[in-house]
Amino acid sequence: MNAKDVISYIHADMDKKYRLQDTTECHAAILKDWMRNDAFLPDQDVDVLRLKYDDAYMGDYERGFHDLCFRQDMFIRYIEQAANGEEDVYFSINSFWNTKRTEANIRHLNAFVIDYDYYKIAEYADLSAAEMYQQHIRPSLVIDPTFVIDSGRGLYCIFCIDHAPYACTGLYKAIYSKLVESQERFGADPKAMLTTQVIRVPGSINSRSGRTVAVLEAKDQRYTLSELAHQFLPYTRQQVRDYKREKAKAAFGQAKKAAAGKRKANRYQSELAELESDLIALISMRNDVGITVGYREVLLYLYWERAAKTKMEEESITKKILWLNSLFTMPLTEKEALSRCRPAQNYRFVTGREKMVRKLGVSEEEQRRLKYLVTRKRRNSLRQAKSRKKACVQRRGRTSAQEVRYKRRCALLKGLSQGLNLQDLAESLGVTKKTLRNDCKYIHDHHAEFAAVIRSVNKSLTHAMNMLGIVETHSDSIENEHLRCQQYEYFIRR
């Protein structure tokens, strides 16, 4: 069996199409010294455009020992030439989508190859490839190889498989690993089990030994990945699925726990920021009314306790404590602030809001200007007010600020319909002329929001537009609402 027959059998699916309109062509790689072995370059004359864009065309700039990928016809041509005694020529077992021999570009998984470097083991160093295979390797294999090839120094055993796409790469690697592991005692190379693996072309010369790479045995034998998985992998498909499901569940649980911890940490940070803001406001209020002592140590202690709970660094806490201390009308000394106010230890629980309010003696008047240091009754009252405001917004569809802007824009529409200019309207509405120009732009972009107002003032607007010469006099008779809104848009632009 010659090299062309062997490699054509391995790469039988190079022209396989996944769908009728599939125009993608498979590529296979050849690895050799293109400078030394240049007897079968595609052409003698160099075409610059083909040199740059055609993957089947090479020039001097590409020569050297490296791999190039080719389509099926050119690939077989090179194999036929290499089988005529070229030195150190390799071909890829699997095929690729494009001209780069990388795992990400694999299109067809074609075979497993075990590369036996048995000559490195003293016990087998004197045996020929045929003797090594017949006496030791063949009895140890649980499945028969499709091809057995003498590599010139070692031995290749090739196990061809039915067409398998790139999606099966994980299963392919798992089987490959077990297959090579079972033959390591005979010198199977664990490094030569890549999905992009290359081996010597039968009929080429191994320059290290000077011997020709020869086919020792060939069979019409293909396996499926499922058969090999059942043979070599220790777990069934269902066991693998159950394991993946449990692993995914555990990962989800850990991710959920981590997310909960992150949310908790963020809540602590947010609460600390609110507490700091309230403490600053409380100090300012009490400085204004002349309360200078009686709460300083407690205030600094409470902040220190919360800051330590959020895992803030000690140096940052110290700086913050000294800064808060400087806000008092009569601050503590630095030694007093850092010794008296330091918590004895990082307690598991920190002082609650209600207790903070009692310790600091925060009055109801002071609570009206605070957000965090308030009693539960005050918090409930604020929450209810917020809910009422939200319900009101949901009913009206606008916040209080949006309602103010909407009413101003409606007044602007009515004023324009009465013939007032922007300057007069700005003075009457208490805003600047620029604000009204922005309102006009908003109305122009969202005229559907003001459709009811536009309908109510439409006749006046049409009259104003007629006076300005923007539309013809017969526009008064237009009944289509969309056209009326479009007329108004022109008016706003004016």
Image: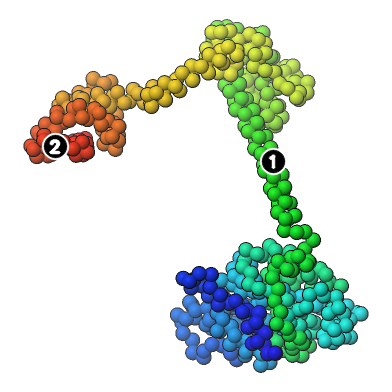
Q: Is residue 44 left or right of residue 458?
A: right
Q: Does dot 2 land on a helix, a strand or a loop? A: loop
Task: Name the residue at 55% across, 18% down.
Answer: 371
Label at residue 253: 1
Task: Name the residue at 8% across, 38% down.
Answer: 474
Task: Name the residue at 76% across, 83% down.
Answer: 148
Label at residue 478: 2
Choose top left, top right, bottom left or bottom right for residue 277: top right
Q: Residue pushed farthest left?
A: 473
- Residue 4, percent from left and from top: 64, 87
Can see residue 86? Answer: no
Callout 1, which amino acid? Gly
Label at residue 148: none
Q: Earlier in the sequence, mark 2 or mark 1?
A: 1
Q: CA distance from mark 2 to mark 1?
A: 65 Å
Taking depth in this image into account, of 177 and 98 the one nearest to the observer is 177
Callout 2, which amino acid? Ile
Q: Is residue 352 left or right of residue 425?
A: right
Can see residue 256? Answer: yes
Task: Name the residue at 71% across, 21% down.
Answer: 350
- Residue 48, percent from left and from top: 46, 82
Crowd band around label 2 with a 10 angstrom C-alpha radius: few (<14), some (14–19), many (20+): few
Taking depth in this image into account, of 25 and 379 the one nearest to the observer is 25
- Residue 338, percent from left and from top: 72, 21
